[in-house]
Image (cartoon, rainbow, N blue to C red):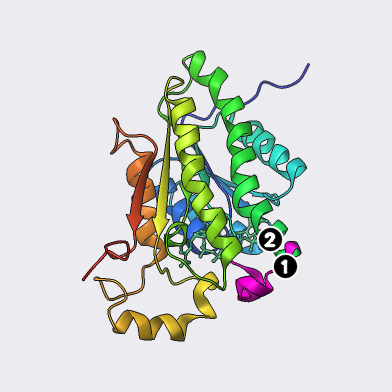
Amino acid sequence: MNPPTPFSVRPVALVTGASRGIGRAIALGLARAGFAVVVNYSASEAAAREVCESIVAAGGTAVAVGADVSQSLDRKKLIAATIEAYGRLDLLVNNAAITSPGRLDLLAATEENWDRVFALNLKGPFFLSQAAVARMLPLIHSGKISGAKIINISSISAFAISTDRADYCLTKAALGMMTGLFAARLADEKIQVFEVCPGLIATDMTASVQAKYDRQIAEGLMPMRRWGAPEDVAQAVVAIATDAFPFSTGERIHVDGGFHLRRL
Ligand code: NAP
């Protein structure tokens, strides 16, 4: 006979791309808020383990799970590992993404890069959400969990044009529609869906363009003249995760120092 699946007393959050940057801050923030956290990574295993160790050292619970979110089999493995570890899934944070490889002008953009970016940034979150919901629904219907959520980490690139990152912009714009689609479909199932749009956040992703954005921020690119920190995004995610928005779904939360405001 198989041993019974454990059932975590803490709500469980799966955070994709949680080894570094914004995902790491989200994992640490959710753990502080009482979630058991599945820390997903694809290449940075040691970094993911360090995130888990920090969480455990602070009295929390976490497990690192390697899975390439752009790959179908890996997505299945990731959800299965979550249930195997904790017996439940309350929150999926679709955070893992890559920027446009080589930042090529759109007239030079390649199909190969397009496929890579779309596979991770859009197809991954879509089908991972589908797989997560398949596990959440029986738990909700049996009364074992309540307040389930999906949070998509999008970007100001969902609406701000960068002609050297067309593929990235298109995936982030589509994540906005994906958020609405899942929010509408899942409202009756009592699963809320949100989109968080970070602005310029100091992480590995923006390290190569730091000098350019340093200059633009000083010149007033956004009303709040500073880089965002991963923790700024994590705070918004934790607020959503801990039910600060009980009568909202499909909502877009900007974490961008006011970048999205049109000004004259
Ligand atoms: P980052 O520093 O480059 O970190 C990316 C994370 O994603 C890493 O943990 C990486 O883990 C993981 N990852 C990469 N490929 C993966 C794959 N195939 N499967 C699973 N995980 C994978 O990026 P970030 O700046 O923190 O960005 C996080 C999210 O915020 C992204 O959705 C990004 O689009 C969004 N965002 C960032 C900014 C910004 O200014 N930084 C602005 C707006 C939106 P491994 O090293 O293990 O592969």
Distance, label 2 to label 1, CA atoms, is 6 Å
**Camera-nearest residue between 139 and 160:** 160
Residue 259 in magenta stretch: no
Q: Residues within 10 Å of mark 1 (few under 14, many from 20)?
A: few
Type of amino acid under label 2: Trp
Identify the image quadrant of the C terminus: bottom left
Residue 153 visible at all: yes
Measured from the top left, where is residue 112 in percent x and y?
Answer: 76, 63
Q: Quadrant of residue 43?
A: bottom right
Q: Is residue 209 left or right of residue 230?
A: right
Quick one: SS at disc 2? helix
Question: Which residue is label 1 attached to?
Answer: 110
Residue in view at x 23 percent, y 68 percent: 263
Is 11 above or below relative to 143? Answer: below
Is the CB of the residue bearing disc 2 within 8 angstroms of ligand 1? no
Residue 36 visible at all: no
Q: Quadrant of residue 132?
A: top right
Residue 101 in magenta stretch: yes
